[in-house]
């Protein structure tokens, strides 16, 4: 299996995952490589679009301590227009199509249970063609997308 990334890329990503502001010179020193080589690798990965450097917001720090996953059935032929409406809700942090036809999955964040209640019972039902099929309050996130990296075996051998 060919992969355009090798173990050095993996180790660089591991360091950047810990702190995306880590200077290339520090990563180079830790990995025993030249700063120039590390900079070129980082630039290459950015150019290939494998990720982006961004700030990850901690919702509870802003009072948004309630998270809910919601699954909904959408009227046939309305998925795109309903998705467009959903994308405008600031409460939503995740919107995706499900494998089943006419199914959407969303994740939302709230400050209060009353805000959640109103969203589930008034906001979503006010969108014509949407029916909530299931929802669950997330009591604790154990692993989030922010920390995901492909497993080390997904990277080719080290090419010095």
Image (tube, rainbow, N blue to C red):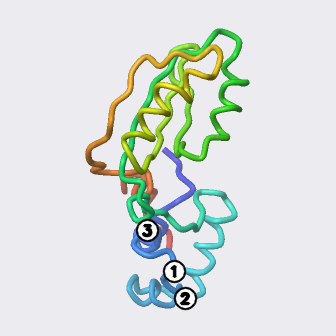
Residue 155 vs 108, above or below: the answer is below
Tell me the distance, in whole angstroms, between the alpha carbons under discs 2 and 1.
15 Å
Q: Nearer the viewer, residue 20 or 122?
A: 122
The circle drawn on residue 35 is: 2
Asked if residue 18 shows in the view, the reply is: yes
Choose the circle earlier in sequence order: 2 or 3. Answer: 3
Q: Residue furthest top?
A: 76
Give the foreground label among 2 and 3: 3
Tell me the distance, in whole angstroms, between the alpha carbons under discs 2 and 3.
18 Å
- Give the residue number, with chain letter if any, for mark 1: 21
Mark 2 and mark 1 in contact? Answer it, CB < 8 Å. Answer: no
Q: Nearer the viewer, residue 89 or 159?
A: 89
Point out residue 156 in the picture as x, y percentages from the top left corner. 46, 57
Q: Is residue 113 left or right of residue 81?
A: left
Q: Residue at x 69, y 16 (%)?
A: 78
Give the foreground label among 2 and 1: 1
Point out residue 21 in the picture as x, y percentages from the top left corner. 51, 80
Residue 18 vs 30, above or below: the answer is above
Choose the circle earlier in sequence order: 2 or 1. Answer: 1
The quadrant holding residue 45 is: bottom right
Tell me the distance, in whole angstroms, between the alpha carbons under discs 1 and 3.
9 Å
Q: Residue at x 65, y 68 (%)?
A: 44
- Give the residue number, with chain letter if any, for mark 3: 17
Q: Secondary structure at mark 2?
A: helix
Residue 12 vs 78, above or below: the answer is below
Q: Residue at x 51, y 24 (%)?
A: 98
């Amino acid at each position: 299996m060919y992969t355009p990334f090798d173990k050095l890329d993996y180790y660089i990503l591991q360091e950047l995952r810990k702190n995306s502001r880590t200077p290339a010179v520090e990563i180079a020193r830790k990995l025993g490589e030249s700063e120039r080589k590390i900079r070129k690798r980082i630039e290459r990965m950015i150019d290939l679009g494998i990720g982006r450097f961004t700030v990850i917001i901690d919702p509870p720090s802003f009072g948004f301590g309630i998270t809910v996953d919601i699954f909904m059935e959408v009227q046939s032929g309305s998925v795109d227009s309903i998705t467009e409406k959903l994308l405008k809700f600031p409460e939503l942090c995740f919107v995706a199509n499900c494998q089943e036809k006419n199914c959407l999955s969303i994740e939302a964040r709230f400050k209060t249970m009353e805000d959640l209640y109103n969203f589930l019972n008034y906001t979503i039902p006010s969108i014509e063609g949407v029916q909530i099929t299931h929802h669950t309050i997330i009591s604790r996130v154990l692993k989030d997308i922010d920390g995901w990296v492909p497993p080390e075996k997904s990277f080719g051998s080290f090419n010095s």
